[in-house]
Amino acid sequence: MTLGIYPGTFDPITHGHADVIARSLHVVQHVVVAVAPNHRKAPLFDIKERVELAKIATQHLPGVVVEPFEGLLVEYVRRRGAQAIIRGLRAVSDFEHEFQMALLNRKLDKNLETIFLMASEEYSYLTSSMVKEVAAVGGPLHDFLHPEVAERLKTQLRLTQS
Ligand code: ADP
């Protein structure tokens, strides 16, 4: 069995993330979507909600498990018995940060590979932050988010704005 770990903040999960997950299943048999607390980014949704939303958005994909993770990624990957870290690349702007992280993780575990996948070009501009901005001004979300995720985002923004 080949297992990949797709770590991220997923605040919330978008069609871009889901596309990367679907593509990763062409390379590995199973994927764990590993949701990080990432306090540095001050996420809109708490980790439990982000896990729940990622489960909803990937329920159509066989071989995908979503779970929270904390601590050092390379240790988590080892514990999980995975072969690779999966990351997505949108544009050149993602590259430097992703490159540094991949090299750092390789330094921490020389046998660990990071696989980079590009989402379909229609999602290449898509970020969770941009989607939150569109939602905050009442824009349409159907091209970016699973319908249930979109509803939850609208509700969450109403709660935080009131
Ligand atoms: P992080 O906080 O770790 O960057 P994100 O949830 O923002 O977590 O993203 C997780 C991974 O998915 C990152 O590798 C990011 O570059 C990638 N990603 C996010 N959106 C897209 C997209 N639209 N297309 C391709 N990759 C994406």
Image (tube, rainbow, N blue to C red):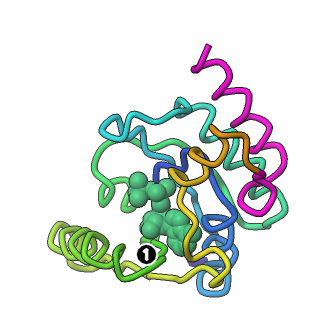
Say which residue appears at 27% left-offset and 74% top-offset.
Answer: 102
Q: Is residue 35 left or right of residue 121?
A: left
Give coordinates of residue 142: x percent, y percent: 81, 56
Q: Is residue 62 left or right of residue 8?
A: right
| Dominant secondary structure, magenta | helix
Check mark 1 vs ligand 1: CB closer than 8 Å? yes or no. Answer: no
Q: Is residue 92 above or below residue 132?
A: below
Picture residue at 78% right of the left edge, 52% below the top: 140
Left/right of residue 91 with respect to residue 68 in the rendered view: left
Residue 15 in percent (x, y) is at 69, 64
**Mark 1 crowdedness (10 Å alpha carbons): few <14, some 14-19, many ≥20:** many
Where residue 96 sits, quadrant-wise, is: bottom left
Instruction: Using the image, determine if residue 27 lies above or below residue 82.
Output: below
Quarter of the rendering occupied by the N terminus: bottom right
Residue 7 visible from this viewpoint: no
* Residue 89 seen in the figure: yes
Where is residue 109 drawn, in percent x and y? Answer: 22, 70
Judged from the image, the secondary structure of the residue bearing numbered disc 1 is strand
Magenta span includes 142: yes
Q: Nearer the viewer, residue 108 or 81?
A: 108
| Residue 14 in the image, given as x and y percentages of width and height | 65, 58
Write the start and end of the magenta stretch as one range: 140-162
The picture quadrant where one finds residue 115 is: bottom left
Q: Which residue is mark 1?
A: 84
Q: Can you say which quadrant of the picture contains the C terminus?
A: top right
Q: Is residue 14 above or below residue 101?
A: above
